[in-house]
Amino acid sequence: MSPSKSGNDYARSLSLLWGSQTVPGRSGLTVQKIVAAGMDMADENGIEQLSMRKVAERLEVGAMSLYTYVPGKSELLELMLDKSQANLYACDDIRAECGGDWREAMRFIAKTNWTLFGKHPWITELSGRRPVFGPHIVLKYEMELSALDGIGLSDIEMDSTLSLLLMHVESCARLQTSMNRTQKTSGIDDNEWWLEYSTAMENMADWSRFPVSSRVGNAAGELHQSAYSPEHAYQFGLERIIAGTAALIGRSEPR
């Protein structure tokens, strides 16, 4: 959202998010169809290439027709973001679905969000925007929080733990998206790049000056066949977050 929006603008945005999106107008369009077209285009080319004009061309209507349904690109992105998070969980009770184990529930939440970012990489491009409180996003928050409810965390700790988990997954997914884009544009995969680059580097420096970097870097490079692995970082960090949460729950001092 733009910081210059007024209360009426926010009310209109929320009305779009929470209102019916399936009622057709005179042209036969619906908000739902516009959002679906926008998501398809963003999945294909990212949000930088997305515009109201291009969405209109995709739907074979005049650009002005869209504005009677969605005021602009900012609102369209909000609708797309909310829609992308619909029906992520088949079961209302995530922890019950995971056998009542909050640790498995956290792993399941992380995996679900990792898959979401893989399906819609453009979501990571919206980082830094103010939150969107659409119905699907609010329901997702409710379900994910509920998986942490009653395990020994305060309300603030529940929110902070979930935020830490989701930010970790998003950060790793953003790096994975960037690496995928680089591989696509360069035509060279990371394994091939690492082999060529590391071979060239061997003759460019006196590695005896960097004994720890050389030892650790070689070990990591051998494991990942690249400079780093976003998926490995995601898995490693996830387990550290779960361990930290367990320690927080098991603390002896009062909250």
Image (tube, helix red, strand yellow):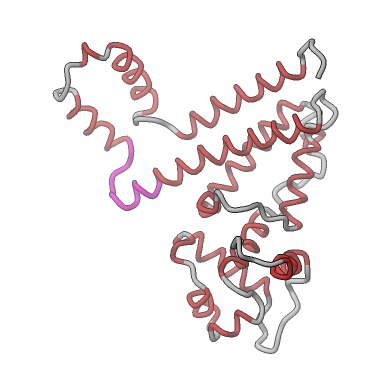
Rendered view: 10 above or below 246: below
Rendered view: 252 above or below 82: above
Q: Identify the image quadrant of the C terminus.
A: top right
User: Residue 101 at what x, y percent from top left?
Assistant: 77, 26
Q: Residue at x 33, y 38 (%)?
A: 190
Label total for image:
0
Q: Quarter-wise, where is residue 154 in the image?
A: top right
Q: Nearest the camera: 143 or 153?
A: 153
Question: In the visual, does 124 lie left or right of 5?
Answer: left
Query: What kind of secondary structure does the magenta stretch mostly adopt?
Result: helix
Question: In the visual, does 56 lie left or right of 218?
Answer: right
Q: Quarter-wise, where is residue 240 in the image?
A: top right
Q: Residue at x 72, y 81 (%)?
A: 24
Question: In the visual, does 233 lie left or right of 240?
Answer: left
User: Residue 105 at what x, y percent from top left?
Assistant: 73, 32
Q: Identify the image quadrant of the N terminus.
A: bottom right
User: Residue 90 at what x, y percent from top left?
Assistant: 76, 47
Report the span colored magenta.
180-190
Residue 183 covered by magenta stretch: yes
Q: Nearest the camera: 200 or 76?
A: 76
Outermost residue on the left side: it is 203
Question: In the visual, does 212 lie left or right of 92?
Answer: left
Q: Nearest the camera: 16 or 233?
A: 16
